[in-house]
Structure formats: structure tokens, C-alpha cells
Image: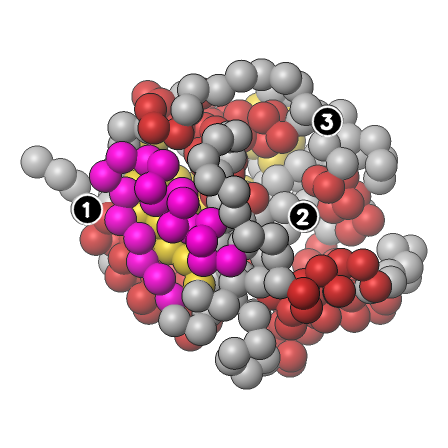
Amino acid sequence: MIDTRGVSLCTESFGDPSDPPVLLVMGSGASMLWWDADFCRMLADRGRFVIRYDHRDTGRSTTYEPGQPGYTGVDLADDAVGVLDAYGLPAAHLVGVSAGGGLAQLAALDHPERVRSLVLVSTTRAVPGGPELPPPTEDFMHFAASAHVDWSQPDSVVDYLVDYSRVLTGGRRPFDELAARDLVRRDVERAHDIAAIQNHDVLPDDDRTHPPLSSIAVPTLVIHGTADPMFPLAHGEALADAIPGTALLPLEDAGHGVERPDWETIVRAVVAHTAPRS
């Protein structure tokens, strides 16, 4: 547990602290468990000091009353920097997925001296500007409009989050329901209040202005599934175009998130991208 800016965040590290540091930033409503421990160990075994953490309102970090978040999205981005402070790291490589990729972008824009490089997975532009982008798929929109959950009943929450995970795979690959159910159940049982993850959907805007994405000067890699139902591939392509010198790694038939079949590809790409530069 670390304390930063008046909140407590649960963190976990893997590997040798003398290795290049990689901070993993998970997406909206997701605790650090969604960065699988075996994935973290794969990175650590290849010479990276890996840190994962629970956002506010997830896992064991500070939790607010559902519907009453006492913070903004920018506060979540600043929390990432707070984790670096707690570990005594002047800067780190940030790997963000989904909304975590947006938080990583904001951290690079607002605290450029703290970010060595960016890896942005299954995400979209964090600041306004650029071409119009396609909406989520019909299947995703149908689920968002029709799914029901009783947040007071753990079994209902588990069923809902498993169904949501199925939709996020994009439908082109088999869905491992047993693995998804095990992860979700552990996440629900571990959380102070799983209903509080809804706060990430209602965060107020603090009206802070940010520099354009074109001002990001650190090496950046965009990784994006070709079957992403939330942010279709065009979002990753537009993000890569917006940040100078950014490379794009498409994952064929991958959906939204860091899926087990892609671990080796993603780990290899992150290790290469975060290799010390002369």
C-alpha cells in the first residue's frame, strides 16, 4: 500500500528494481488483477521492473461511495505519477490499456519528465482533435444498452462482468469462460466495494487543458486488435498518426484488452520498445 495525494493505492512489483521500470496502467473499472500476474512475470523475467496497481475505486485502493467519486479522470493520471514517487522512480515506461492508455497519454502530456516511453493498447485519443472515428460495434452497443446487473449481488456482478468480457473479445476467437469467470470472481471478492467501479463512468471533468498529442516526444508504440469492438482499429491508427514517430502493431483478430494468446507478442514488443537507448 502506498499513500499519494491523500489516497491509498494498492500496488505490486515484479522483478529487479535495478532493471528498466515499467508501470502498467489498467483501464476503467479494472483492478490490477486484469494485468495477469503471469504476464507481469513474463516481463520481469526479460529484464523489466514491473509495477501494477489498483486504481481508486478498484481492488484494495481507496474506495468512494458508488455514484459519488471524489476525484476526476486527471486525478487518476496523476495517481500513476504518485506510484512512481512512492517507488522512488524519477521516470518509467508506461504501458496503458483502454482507458489506462488515455491516462498514460495524460501523464505524458502533463508530466513529460516522468515518462520514458509509452505503449498504448486498445485505446484512443485522450484529448480532442483529429478525424472523426467509428463508434463501437453493434454487438457492443447492444450489450451496453441491454445488460442488467444487481450490484448488491456478487453472483449477478460476476455474470455481468463475464458477459462483458465475452463481448470485448470481438467474436473472432474462442472465449475462455472458465478463465474469465475465475478472474472476475477473484476481482469481486477482493474489492472493498465492487459497485464502486461504476464511479469511473461518471467522473467529472476538471476542465484542465492539455497540450496536443503531437507534443508527446517520447518513443510511443500503439498496439491494437483488429477486432476491437469498443475502439475499432481506426482509433489505434489515428492515435499512431497523432503522435510523431509512433509505430502501430496490429493484433490480428484480437479484441479489446490484453488477451492470453497475444501475451508473447505484446511482451516481446514491450521489451524491445523499452530497451535502453544509447
**Above/below status of 218 relative to 222:** above
Which residue is pictured at 21% across the width and 53% down the height?
A: 272
First to last magenta residue range: 232-251
- Given residues 61 and 153, the one toward you in this image is 153
Which residue is pictured at 31% across the width and 47% down the height?
A: 221
Residue holding disc 2: 29
The x and y percentages for residue 239 are 40, 43
- Given residues 134 and 168, the one toward you in this image is 134
Q: Is residue 270 left or right of residue 148?
A: left
Callout in the foreground (3, 2): 3
Tell me the crowding category of disc 1: few under 14, some 14 to 19, or many 20 or more residues within 10 angstroms, Cα based: few
| Rendered image: mark on residue 275 | 1
On whether residue 246 falls in the magenta region, the answer is: yes
Label 3's element? loop
Q: Earlier in the sequence, mark 1 or mark 2?
A: 2
Which residue is pictured at 52% across the width and 47% down the height?
A: 133
Q: Is residue 92 left or right of residue 104?
A: left
In three-dimensional space, the C-alpha distance between marks 1 and 2, rounded to whole angstroms, equals 30 Å
Q: Quadrant of the N terminus?
A: top right
Which residue is pictured at 45% across the width and 35% down the height?
A: 130
Residue holding disc 3: 204
In three-dimensional space, the C-alpha distance between marks 3 and 2, rounded to whole angstroms, equals 15 Å
Q: Residue furthest bottom?
A: 174
